[in-house]
Amino acid sequence: MIRIFGPVLALLAAVGMAGTAFAETFEVKMLNRGEKGPMVFEPDYLDIKPGDRVVFVPTHKSHNVATIDGMIPAGVEGVKSKINEQFETTFDAAGFYGIKCSPHLGMGMVMLIKVGEASLPESYKAVSLPARAKPRMDELISKAEKAAQ
């Protein structure tokens, strides 16, 4: 009986860790200039699974990553990284996450992350953003809505 117990525990441990074994890591670059112009995240839209990690890489100085107030799932605590530092976070809760670079929000530096099966809340469309950020976020919201159809 003792000889069987060890392998059974190992099997149970492996099954328990299977969910994290399939998690992916995505890299997002924070750029002064990218394919879509100045002050951008590349990519600026991600569709990931719960448990996936995102690594935000400041390829130029003075960038950070922070969630946008009013654009995170209910009950989820927002994040804010330090300036000029790579930041990694795991997205466990399903939903949509609006992301900004705090110093460059006024220049339109935003992105949208969809985690798991989620519907985009209508309230996201009414979130107040600076003049350059609003059309970029509207484009990302439109992309998310088209992908859901």
Image: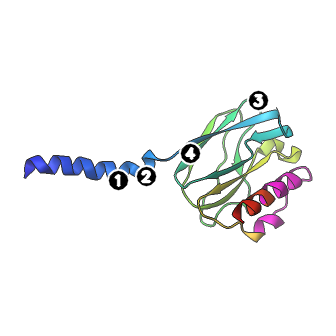
**Quadrant where the image shows the C terminus:** bottom right
Considering every residue shown, the one lying at the far bottom of the view is 122
Nearer the observer, 113 or 82? 113
Disc marking residue 2: none
Mark 2 and mark 3: Cα distance apart in space: 35 Å
Q: Could you tell which of marks 4 and 3 lies nearer the N-terminus?
A: 4
How crowded pointer 4 is (Cα within 10 Å; few <14, some 14-19, many 20+) is rated as some
Secondary structure category for the residue under label 1: helix
Secondary structure category for the residue under label 4: strand
Examine the image and state in which quarter residue 62 appears: top right
Q: Could you tell which of marks 3 and 1 lies nearer the N-terminus?
A: 1
Find out whether the residues at labels 2 and 3 contact each other: C-beta distance under 8 Å: no
Find out whether the residues at labels 2 and 1 contact each other: C-beta distance under 8 Å: yes
Name the residue beneath numbered marker 4: 53
Residue 13 location in percent, x, y? 30, 50
Q: Given the image, on which type of amino acid does mark 4 rest?
A: Arg
Examine the image and state in which quarter residue 28 appears: top right
How crowded pointer 3 is (Cα within 10 Å; few <14, some 14-19, many 20+) is rated as few
Disc marking residue 19: 2
Name the residue beneath numbered marker 3: 61
Mark 2 and mark 1: Cα distance apart in space: 7 Å
Mark 3 and mark 1: Cα distance apart in space: 40 Å
Q: Given the image, on which type of amino acid does mark 1 rest?
A: Gly
Q: Main secondary structure of the magenta part?
A: helix
Name the residue beneath numbered marker 1: 16
Mark 4 and mark 2: Cα distance apart in space: 13 Å
The answer to whether residue 128 is magenta is yes
Residue 124 location in percent, x, y? 77, 64
Q: Is residue 140 left or right of residue 86?
A: right
